[in-house]
Image (cartoon, coloured by chain):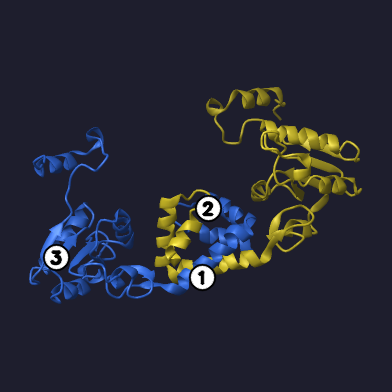
Chain colours: A yellow, B blue
Amino acid sequence: MSAIDRLIQLLAKLPGLGPRSARRAALHLVKRRETLLVPLARALAEAADAIRTCSVCGNLDAGDPCAVCADTRRDPSVICVVEDVADLWALERAGSFRGTYHVLGGVLSALDGVGPEDLNLSALVTRAGAGAVTEVILATSATVDGQTTAHYIAERLAGCNVVVSGLAHGVPVGGELDYLDDGTLSAALKARRPVE
Amino acid sequence: MSAIDRLIQLLAKLPGLGPRSARRAALHLVKRRETLLVPLARALAEAADAIRTCSVCGNLDAGDPCAVCADTRRDPSVICVVEDVADLWALERAGSFRGTYHVLGGVLSALDGVGPEDLNLSALVTRAGAGAVTEVILATSATVDGQTTAHYIAERLAGCNVVVSGLAHGVPVGGELDYLDDGTLSAALKARRPVE
């Protein structure tokens, strides 16, 4: 197989790229040797070298512990539990959480055969029980599997002396009521609060 | 900037990937270190090393002359002129052309300020005039700029002793009449042929 065909085949494995767009991306790269192809090859090699899973929280970052766990300005007494590294990144982009994280690596799912032992769960219980933690925020998805997982974790943490909380449900900021589903509207009504 | 941020920034420069999908792709890569991240880094480095522009036809391939120009089973007396390497690849996938190619690297465009000297044109005239070539097929796009370019090339080749031809216009194979534009339908009617 030629160098270009191998490149196209690998690019087609990226999410969002099919065989046709992988071809387009490969040509784009090959035409921009110095500005894109070489820097991307270098960035990938560096990422392969540097990036590892944080042994504390399960985040992916250059260095172990990760930048979040290593940051002494952050509050280690609050742990936010997320399904995936992508969720951690999303919360970091929002920039309003100053505690630490714990990445589960998925959710419990009878259908997909994912049990508690497949998730990064016992490490969470150990962290929560170590004494320094006062609150665990369960930020799993608002799906059936996500909420099942949250309930399971809440039960597992019952023995630890921590407050277990969950994200608020309601109208997304900037969202129009007209486009919202019934469940979200009901939740937003139920959790209504006095206007200050 | 961290290794992951740099990777995301570079991936976002690929066609078809925005900042959001670049983030998804980066995470996908970092999670699949051995099966995708390392092989892709290697494939890119290899492509950067091996791939160059063919000095004969302007194709991008590992090696100069490219695999098409170097293939002795192909007919060097017919040259198919295309705008871009992507068009050459498309014709090669179709697999019915056994001649050689010439890649212009664009089309004439008054709007974008692309003149004849910006295209790989004089090399084409030299190739066509060298004596071994009998036919030049103009396979530029059926757009205004593409057809202007084809007319210009036909004029430039008037001095060479070669047949200059263009691709047929008509109904795409598998295409429904209902969805075709008026221009294509008119062209297909005008170029109708006896049923054998």
Q: Does dot 1 land on a helix, a strand or a loop?
A: helix
Residue kind at label 1, given as amino acid type = Ala
How many numbered markers are drawn? 3
Q: Which residue is mark 3?
A: B135
Which numbered tag is attached to residue B45?
A: 1
Residue kind at label 2, given as amino acid type = Leu
Q: Quadrant of residue B6?
A: bottom right
Give x and y (percent) for residue A95.
68, 49
Give x and y (percent) for residue B69.
28, 71
| Residue B39 versus residue B180 in the image, above or below | below
> Which subunit holds the residue at mark 2?
A
Indicate left or right for B10 with B51 as reference: right
Q: Does dot 2 land on a helix, a strand or a loop?
A: loop
**Whether residue A169 can be seen here:** no
Q: Nearer the viewer, mark 2 or mark 3?
A: 3
Give x and y (percent) for residue A11.
49, 57
> Which subunit holds the residue at mark 1?
B
Q: Nearer the viewer, residue B4 or A97?
A: B4
Residue kind at label 3, given as amino acid type = Glu
Q: Residues within 10 Å of mark 2 (few under 14, many from 20)?
A: some
Which numbered tag is attached to residue A14?
A: 2
Give yes or no for contact between labels 2 and 1 (Cβ–Cβ under 8 Å).
no
Q: Nearer the viewer, residue A71 or A30?
A: A30
**Whether residue A33 can be seen here:** yes
Q: CA distance from mark 2 to mark 1?
A: 18 Å
Identify the residue at horizontal 22%, vertical 61% (top origin): B110
Q: Residues within 10 Å of mark 3 (few under 14, many from 20)?
A: some
Quarter of the picture holding the C terminus of chain A: top right
